[in-house]
Image (cartoon, rainbow, N blue to C red):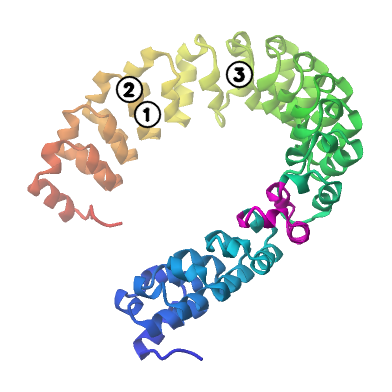
Amino acid sequence: MKSKLTQEQRSWLQENDYYNPSDAPAEFMKDRNFALEFCIENGDALEYISVEFRGDEEIVHAAVKQSGNAIQYADFPVRKKRDIILSAVTNRGEALEYAHEVLRNDPEIVLAAVTQDGSAIQYASEKLRADESIVRVALTSSKGAFQYASEAIRMKEEFVKLAIASEEGYGSILQYTSDEFRSNKEIVLSIVSKDGSELEYATEALRADKDVVMAAITNYASSIRSAAESLRNDAELAKFILKENGSQLSNFSKAIRSNIEIVKIACDNSVWALRDVSEAIRDNDEFMTNLLKKENGAFEHASERIRSNVDVFKLVFTRDDVGAFQYAGESIRAVREYVDLATSKNGRMLEYADPSFRSDEDIVIQAVFNDGYALNFASAALKSKKDVVLTAVNQSGSSLEYASADLKDDEEIVLAALKNDKTAIQYASKRLRTSKDFIGGIIDSGVDLWEN
């Protein structure tokens, strides 16, 4: 039966659809009728009701029937109540964690918990984690239960196969069983066919077995890193994997990563594979030029010599994509034509330009006009120049952080910054931040410094 509430209390619950217990009026949460009603519909409200009710068996029982984990907010004496814990774990198996230790050794309670969530067996007593009937039920509910079963159970083939057959939950099998099963090809094949990451725990002999490794990489390409060196040096296997998973190149041997035919296959799938290839390939003019014609992103990983080649640079540096500038060789980043184009599209490219350009007013103004943050890379002299800083803060108020101390105390500069970004007030001088007249003037200009 519903508890009796005032009209105001009932309206609040209905308007909030029994959610947001943290927002409920404090006086409501001190009312037992309200607390009970709330917990019946939303067990998580138990965390927020008055502490005097967290030991109230009726309220706690109502809460855990709706949300088993709410038992963690109940007073400890209540966690000894068998009927309450049974309701909690029936709703949420992992609530067993918060039960009194006596109840974590109760077969009926533990069975109810693992039926709902097999992994809850981790909270059962040592005795019940060795109970075969309970472990069987747990494994039906979750493969993750295997690692928490007793060692004796984990060494039995019946339970290894039950874990393999489980379609629910996550968790390793090979990591927690014996070498007998880690070396059993049939068992290992069954496991890695479902979860390739388990290859890591197979014996060395099976990690060198092509059938086993192929089964693993079919569902988890990264498992190649656990294969024996002989297979990570297998060209045909590399081609098979890298055709669809080029980023796995890093997991192969140095010889494979130096094989230009294989590297091409990897890069055709993922340009990021280039990070892991030999320096000789990254310095190969024909290979890199052909790759750059298809993928600008490869420029970052080319050799220093190629990144300093103007003809190559022009392949990837365009009016629509100036990102290659930051990776170009020093000689290229010293050419005004390229600096001008780069900063006109992305002001932050000033960071990568030859240091001499940080004192070039035309370049710096262009950069901060495009992105005020670029003021960070300007010379000290230009950070003290009012027109440069005003351009920057008009684009990004927070760039006031990089202005000289004198200009952080300039009312015109600071006001411009605040109109763009009110949080820039933190970078203004102490004098302006504590000036009633200045702050008042800002508010009068329409900037609300306290608005969220």
Residue 385 or 375: which is nearer the viewer? 375
Residue interval drawn in magenta: 123-150
Query: Does the image show residue 4?
Result: yes
Position of the C terminus by quadrant: bottom left
Q: How many marks?
A: 3
- The crowding category of the residue bearing disc 2, from other C-alpha atoms within 10 Å (few below 14, some 14 to 19, many at least 20), is many
The CA span between labels 2 and 3 is 26 Å
Q: Position of residue 295 (x, y in %)?
A: 68, 27
Q: Nearer the viewer, mark 2 or mark 3?
A: 2
Instruction: Name the side, left or right, on which 296 lies relative to 416.
Output: right
Tell me where residue 203 sits by quadrant.
Answer: top right
Relative to residue 289, is residue 372 depicted above or below? below
The secondary structure type at the circle numbered 1 is helix
Q: Which residue is mark 1?
A: 374
Q: Which mark is residue 314?
A: 3
The location of residue 335, given as percent across then percent down, is: 47, 13
